Image: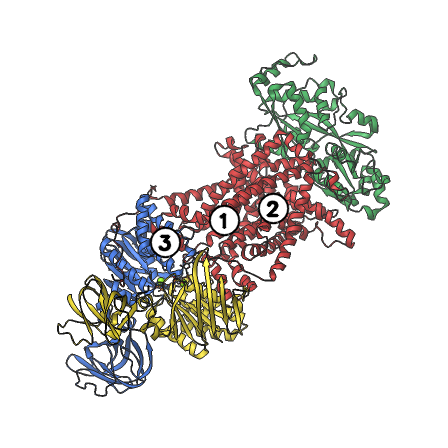
Chain colours: A green, B red, C yellow, D blue
Amino acid sequence: TADEANAAAPQAPAYYPAAYDRIVDASRRERKLLIYSNTSQTNWQPVFDAFVRRYPWLSDIRATNLGGSAVYERYYSESGAGTSPADVLANNAGPLWGDYATRNAAADYRSPEKDHLPDWAELLPGVWTMSTDPVALIYNRKTLDPDQFPDGLRSLAAIVEARPSRFRGKIGVYDPTNAYGYASNQGYTSKVAGGWDTFRRLLPFAHADHSSGTLVEKVVSGEYDFSINLSGGVAIPAAEHSGGLLGWSYYAEGTVVMPRALSVVKTAPHPNAARLFLDFLLSAEGQAAVAEGGLVPYRPDVRQDAMDSLQDMRRRLGADRVHLYRPVRVPERVREAYVARWEKAAG
Amino acid sequence: MAIQTPPAPPAPSRIPRAGELGTPQYRRLFGAGREVTIHWLTFLVTAVLVLAPVVPILYQSVRNQPLYAAGGAFTLSNYTHLFTSAGFGSIVLDTLLFAVLTTVFALAIAVPMAILLERTRFPAARLFGQVLRWPIYISPLVLAFGWIVVYGPAGFLTSAVREGFGWVPWNLYSLPGMAFVEAVAQVPIAYLFCANALAASDTSLENAARSVGAGPLRVLRSVVVPMLRPPMLYAGLLIFGTAIETLSIPLILGEPAGITLFSNFLYEQGIDSINPDYGLLGAASTFMLLTTIALVVFQTRLLGHAQRFVSVRGKATRSDLLDIGAWKWLGFAFVGLYVVFGALLPMLALILRAFTSLLTPLVNPFDLLTLDNFRLIFDYAPYTESIVNSITVAFVGAVAVTLFGTVVVLVARRSDFRFARLLETTAQSPHAVPGLIVGIGLFWAFTWIPGGDAVRGTLFALIIAFGIRALPSAYGAISPATMQLGAELDNAARVAGADWWRTVSRIMLRLLVPAMLASFLLIWTQMIREYAPAMFLAGAESQVIGTTAIDLWTQGETGSVAALATLQIAVTAVVAGLAGLLLKGKKHA
Amino acid sequence: MPELVVENIKKSFHGTAVLEDVNFTVADGEFFTLLGPSGCGKSTTLSCVAGLETPDSGTIRVGDQVFFDGTRRSTVPPEGRNLGLVFQSYALWPHMTVADNLALPLKLRKVTKGEQRRLIDDALTKVDMAHLRDRYPHQLSGGQQQRVALARGIVYSPGVLLLDEPLSNLDAKMRDQARVWLKDLQREVGITTVYVTHDQVEAMSLSDRIAVFMHGRLQQVGTPTEIYETPATPEVAGFIGRCNLLEGRVGATEGGAVQVELGETGQHLRVAGACSAGSSATVGLRSERITLTDRADAPHDGAVNVLRARIEQCSYTGARFEYELSIGDVRVHAESPVRHTDGEINLIIRPDDCLLFPAQV
Amino acid sequence: MPELVVENIKKSFHGTAVLEDVNFTVADGEFFTLLGPSGCGKSTTLSCVAGLETPDSGTIRVGDQVFFDGTRRSTVPPEGRNLGLVFQSYALWPHMTVADNLALPLKLRKVTKGEQRRLIDDALTKVDMAHLRDRYPHQLSGGQQQRVALARGIVYSPGVLLLDEPLSNLDAKMRDQARVWLKDLQREVGITTVYVTHDQVEAMSLSDRIAVFMHGRLQQVGTPTEIYETPATPEVAGFIGRCNLLEGRVGATEGGAVQVELGETGQHLRVAGACSAGSSATVGLRSERITLTDRADAPHDGAVNVLRARIEQCSYTGARFEYELSIGDVRVHAESPVRHTDGEINLIIRPDDCLLFPAQV
Ligand SMILES: Nc1ncnc2c1ncn2[C@@H]1O[C@H](COP(=O)(O)OP(=O)(O)OP(=O)(O)O)[C@@H](O)[C@H]1O
Ligand SMILES: Nc1ncnc2c1ncn2[C@@H]1O[C@H](COP(=O)(O)OP(=O)(O)OP(=O)(O)O)[C@@H](O)[C@H]1O
Ligand SMILES: [Mg+2]
Ligand SMILES: [Mg+2]
């Protein structure tokens, strides 16, 4: 409404460029912001709320939540066809960002927050980290004895090997053929020492599934005892809301952190609003809202107690046991080779 | 006074002279009766609707690059890739087996039930008739989940049976298990089609059989079932097509058992993969389209001499229900078992899941009661909006497709239109093309058609996309019902002075009301849960229940998915109830 | 096959009484006809006998076997009654060929394949349909369908045969042929037949006994001669054959006959029968018993009545001429083998040929 | 309404020829009847006229308006022909009440509500169905349905009325009533009627002209008297009325008559007509033109034939007795108002009453 559009501009931090007001003013005419993401509405909502509190005239902000690759495919198709209504893409599926970067589709924009963030916050040119969700596991506390609660994949391997017949087929794992599945599996085998060894021990006990929903639900029902390689954004709230039925854990031997990233596209119909949103998300205030939505913030000076932040994780597991996954483009050949190797390990 | 033979006619009031009232005049368009225009219009609209998504797909199937990519060249490699993919042969065989099993299961369950509930004296027939439709009210994805909760390896019933007998006679993660679940999801289609046909059946034919000495079962076998051939074939075709195309069940139940069917093969290779292979998708869709067309042609052949199935004729007969005596109780057991274990139990699990934070045999569900799942949906505007959107799309779409489908059927089967056969094949062909691909195809169609950009991303685009997918269902629901109507009924109207369109609107449409309601219901359920075409077409403001459910599902919010399904069941039950009332009103009119 | 007994059958549809107290007995091997105007309940009666409708009350049995008992509401289902029913609406199974339509009852009776073929051929030949045995019903003309329905009802020689206007769409020759066939069948197989027809010539020539049905009630049951010669009521007389019903007032009684004054015409008619003088009565006058004569010198010996009438209309039916006459304002129908010129004419009527019905009070 | 002309119509279904070269003209206001055995193509002819079937070739027109032209394959659709068709299968719309069934053609013609009601009432009263106007077809008896069909065909006074066995399920009284009504209608409204029936009495009494149809061909078109008195072929003679067809050999010719020797019987018949001696011929002998007499002293004056026959069977039809007789091995059918005792009997036949058909070579 007119009231919102005329609301007073909030004070920008001192380190923002003077010209920032022009972006803010321009955004008043844009009014809207559309995000294509594979992040759920629950994760987004606190961020949106905080953002709208800050820029009331941008209350028409929406996320269209699509499957991992659909986010990109839809955007490519739309822009290939002429116009896309999307301003921002957000996704936690690493390899696809690699492909995205080679297409040179990101808007050329340097966020004023960059200097207050780790150097890897801009993962690829124009692709910014929004949260750093750990790859985690969950387990069913009712079907397992307390001494069978794993604290990582390595301990899990030991547990299942102790009673192979009991645990055959009782582990759910993200299928490596899809983007997130590939990243979470490949991240572990490449970053964590002895990753492949652990996989070779574990995978024979595992079933591959295609979605977090299935992986969580099957542990809840007792069909699986454990599900591994889940996104922390899903696994941790699920366990926490399970009334004690589910337990969750990082991987003690080494936890991969999967950056959830976003990027303002070149063709954004609301470029200024999109920039405001990006800057806000990277700010301390934005990061706190991210945590409130159940995702892991990584900005060093963020103040929140909803989630373990990246710093908390480092503190808890040891800095060398937390590995950041860096998205790169994965050629088809490489991926196929990886899947083949993985399937061989699974037997 | 005298009574006379014959009595003098009563004093004549003035009767119009012969021919005085004249022939009714109808507007002529383009120098021909208006039906010619209607026929061509119907044909053209159908052709455009069906070709719109198909042409881009065909084009894609011979391109070596995605359509959005600049450059690219013609190639046949997509087809060679498809046919030489690892395990392609076994995938096709498994898919065929799955589809055949599904069709057989669904018909074997639905046809006897329809007969029992519609044609015989059966306890609580109406109630059963309603309950056994419930499985179509929700998407197979959610239904499969309900089945896992009850019959999965760690399901409620599985655990109970294993505890009791130490052994479980079923395995949900197997081809027959999947086929059964899929069949349960499809039973309502076959049921609706057959029940409709049976409601309009001619009891004098059954009476004739009884009077020559046929017992009730023999009457069913020799008269009732053979007369059901059209609805069975139409339902069979639809179910077969759906089974080939359906993704949820292979994905959720097949994957854990390592069973790959055509649809999840495509999903993994083509859609969910890191590098989606559009060419492969195009080739595969073309392959599926051709299969469907072949099946439609085969079906048409089996239904030649349509007048063999006429049961509503110019000589009216009364209707009555069969009494099958003690067999009734066997039938009751059959229907009861199915309804309780096939339809109700998974559904109840689902509803329970909607009201609990978790659902597992490990914890007493009544300790976990909560409304959080619903709260989540109602807390987020986009979610509630998607429900409203879905209801709009489903309502408008179901009405529009039913009406349009009825006209298509009547042009194809009840007119002298030159391309009637072609129209029939066209209208039925989009069925087996996967929804997502219809979405992609339409996406490009909107791009290429002038003015299409304005439509893309709106609810209207969704109605069109969902409508194209639903057209074969409408056709299948209505066509067998038209076959039951004797040609003399239209002929009488034509001679009395009604042109083709008048005949349709005054006679045919009225007689087809039950079939149209069935079609409406079917399409409503199909549309309210549909998501695949929306993945590419829905804009930010035009999200639907299906996409919301996927969103929640991928985030592991199973409870809210169940809550959404529960809402869907509730809304649909209300709509179905209203439709039923409408029908009853009609009957007594 | 023992006799078929129908006792006190009542039936109503949604409150409209259709059958009221229908009673009749059909003896073993008898050819029994239900004759009555359209809508009087003939088909409903057959349906009740066949078990396709359940009467509201009454009893239906064949010998000792009770098909329906209204007090205990027990019913034998249609298939347990071993009847043959030819439906007024044919009710051919549209999905079966002609031969298959006939084969089903035989199959149900486990007749061997060869025997089946023989019986079907036989029945189809009799209705002249053998050459169309592989057609579907929708490929047949109306009369052909009816013939198939007839053949289907008879092919398995049921114990009781119920025929509902089985010849209505057939031409005279075919009817004759079918009638001969039915008669033969009855003689040879001893089938008990209940026949519904609207054609009284058919009824007369085929039946052992006829039941005249009106408004859901039996008016009279008797042999064709009884029904024709001594109808119980004016309605029956009027329904069977061409019968003129003249209202009059009874005058003098003279030796087994009465003098009836015909309405306003001033003419008198001597009628055999008895009736109290002064009462009103209806006189039935069969059109074929009226002799028309041009001759002015008609016999005036008093043994016959001579009435003066005007010819209003004359029509030709091939075998005969039919006349519409008027005696004063009373219309009379008569027939004659000869063509009479228009104008006035004499009617010669024997008192014995008149039917006298005293008015009911 | 000008005349209806049907020229050279041919029609076949999947290769079976059903109509071959059908030609006839129905004059304005004429009552024209198609009479023929079951399955000969009567209904198909009506369908072609109504535009429900497309003939393979030929022309159909009403006056100048060409309904169908086989050479140009142009057709006027049924709704453009302003015909009334009463279907053999009734074709009532099951979802409409009786009154609504009748209302539709009126509504289509934009007749006002009040006028509709009046016309419907009128038509229903004429078929005695006014009290059932709010019933649905399935609540009616067979004959009642037929009456509704009839009323529906007529209620809008179409230019040409096509009736396909419209009275087949009605009783004699109702038929009479309907026939009077049809005749009146034709007179008053001047409707051109094409009537299909299998009942030749009906045909004879109603029609201005009759077309006798057999095996898809017209055998003879003519007035009832022509058809009856001078049938063109033995088939026509055999079909119209009860006609005995006796095969014989022509002997001496004597003054406008020939002597025909009847088969093996050794008896002779003098027949009016001419025919070359020695050829074979068929003699048609109408059963009502045969006089039966017990008297041995039958006239032997040579002006009439006297044949000796045996009574094989006698049946009673109320008005008359019908006899099956045999002259040697030849069967003859005859009727008489009197009951004759069994045994031998004399038949008296006037040469003028015999029909002579020389054998076709
Ligand atoms: N679809 C068809 N296929 C083949 N033959 C057909 C078809 N329809 C009708 N016939 C044949 O055409 C002939 C004429 O049929 P039509 O209905 O005109 O006879 P009809 O003279 O009306 O006889 P009826 O008095 O029995 O009603 C019949 O012998 C019939 O078997
Ligand atoms: N469902 C119904 N509701 C009300 N009345 C009905 C119903 N069915 C039949 N009737 C009435 O019952 C009466 C008897 O019908 P039925 O069919 O027995 O007559 P019918 O003697 O066979 O006549 P027809 O000679 O015309 O066939 C008719 O007057 C009919 O209108
Ligand atoms: Mg009847
Ligand atoms: Mg016919």
Q: Nearer the viewer, mark 3 or mark 1?
A: 3
Looking at the image, which is closer to me, A139 or B427? A139
SS assignment at label 2:
helix
Looking at the image, which is closer to me, D7 or D189? D189
SS assignment at label 3:
helix
Q: Chain of mark 2?
A: B
Q: Work out how far the residue at label 3 is from the one at label 1, CA to CA, in angstroms.
A: 33 Å
Q: Work out how far the residue at label 1 is from the one at label 2, CA to CA, in angstroms.
A: 18 Å
Q: Chain of mark 3?
A: D
Q: Amino acid at mark 1?
A: Ala
Q: Quadrant of residue D356?
A: bottom left
Taking the image as drawn, is residue B24 in sight? no
Q: Amino acid at mark 2?
A: Trp
Looking at the image, which is closer to me, C324 or B16? C324
Q: Nearer the viewer, mark 3 or mark 2?
A: 3
Q: Quadrant of the N terminus of chain B?
A: bottom left
Mark 1 crowdedness (10 Å alpha carbons): few <14, some 14-19, many ≥20? many
Q: Is mark 2 within 8 Å of ligand 2?
A: no
* Residue position for label 3: D131
Mark 2 crowdedness (10 Å alpha carbons): few <14, some 14-19, many ≥20? many
- Mark 1 and mark 2, same subunit? yes
Identify whether D335 is placed above or below D22: below
Name the outermost residue toward the left: C296
- Quarter of the rendered image showing ligand 4: bottom left
* Residue position for label 2: B134
Residue C104's x, y, as percent? 51, 68
- Mark 3 and mark 1, same subunit? no
